[in-house]
Amino acid sequence: MITRRQTRAVRVGSVTVGGGAPISVQSMTTTKTADVEGTLAQVYALRGAGADIVRITCNDAEAAQGLAGIMPRSPVPIIADIHFQYRLALAALEAGVHGLRLNPGNIRDPRHIREVARAAAERGVPIRVGVNAGSLDKDLLDKYGAPVPEALVESALGEIRLLEDAGFGDIKISVKHSSVPAMVEAYRLLSTKTDHPLHLGVTEAGPPPAGLMKSVAGIATLLLEGIGDTIRFSLTADPVEEAEAGRKLLEQLGLRERIGLDLIACPSCGRADVDVVAVATAAQRALEAEKLSIQVAVMGCVVNGPGEAREADIGIAAGKGKGHLFIKGKVVRVVPEADMVAALVDEARRLAAEGVEARLAAADGVAEELARETADALLASQGDANDLAARRARVARVAKGD
Ligand code: SF4
């Protein structure tokens, strides 16, 4: 059980960040903001992939005008990403955005920050102080010699002070670094200094799979410590992948409810009677098209499969040219191997419509017996990998030279 750090609640349009609210997933569009239709199409795709909040760059006057066209039609709250030009923050507010992201490394004049804070406060719009190791304030770089965690935190706290002195408190903070250990350290330190909600991310993580690993390593480490209120994977990839990855991470950590398919599969081994990778891939494709919120297991053999995956809602295990369909670990039907995926999808549909009890009641009465016979036949030919006592005895005999 994760005990989350207490933070203040900040409203980003319809989404609450911090204050015990569910951890939200963010992503960022890659379209030109002036292209209203293209940007909205991506915003919808991101929402479909699990994003709760979407950030859009506001890098010139055309982008700010694009935001004015996007805002009334967006299905999720929109945050404008601002660098260097504080006037574009004012323009984005005028366009109706739900949040601003300011980079303290490149909007330096306190008068400008105060002016933005005043305009944001009038509209009830929060500001993220988004510190980034790659664009750290030059004075802090000179002081620390490198973008070390302490420098990132000092930058964030300095900006917060400016905003709070202007009477503005609706603040979220990020201190992103491309090094996972430095990022983790920066957030840990920051979490001891402030109760503003924290936006987690590893910056410039790069393309998958390395980018995914960096992001998961940094973000999951902090979330497991109770640190973090909203997250973004910064991948060099289609942003839909970012949103999907963020959402999946939260689901796997038990921090958000599952909204789609969770396919588990055994890694396969010499005991497998089928190409587990091919079956799992085909099952994933077919089940995703069904849009069912269900946990499905694909197991390479009936010897261990149904038992090991008994927590899954439904699963299939191969053995001697057949597929053994099981629900909550109980084998309910045996089908030819060629029909495994089709049978799995059919049963998943029925399970979603009728429920576990009804589908267990409709089980084929001889399926369990057939599965046992197949498992026994496989054990007879392959041996029982789980029979530790027999294995120990064999090892002992070999060791003694019997
Ligand atoms: S379920 Fe069977 S095939 Fe898959 S890893 Fe376990 S023993 Fe091997």
Image (tube, rainbow, N blue to C red):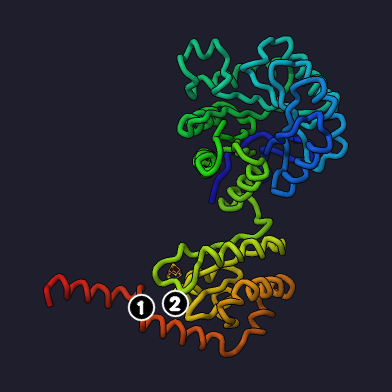
Q: Earlier in the sequence, mark 2 or mark 1?
A: 2
SS state under label 1: helix
The amino acid marked with disc number 2 is Val
Residue contact between numbered discs 2 and 1, judged by CB atoms under 8 Å: yes
> Which residue has dot 2 on it?
303
Above or below: residue 135 compared with residue 360: above
Above or below: residue 135 compared with residue 389: above
State which quadrant residue 26 falls in.
top right
If the picture is divided into quarters, which one holds ligand 1? bottom left
C-alpha distance separating marks 2 and 1: 10 Å
Residue 369 seen: yes
For ligand 1, tell me if the residue under mark 2 lies within 8 Å. yes
- The residue at 60%/66% (across/down) is 296
- The residue at 74%/34% (across/down) is 31
Residue in front for this viewpoint, 10 or 215: 215
Above or below: residue 78 compared with residue 289: above
What numbered label is drawn on residue 382?
1
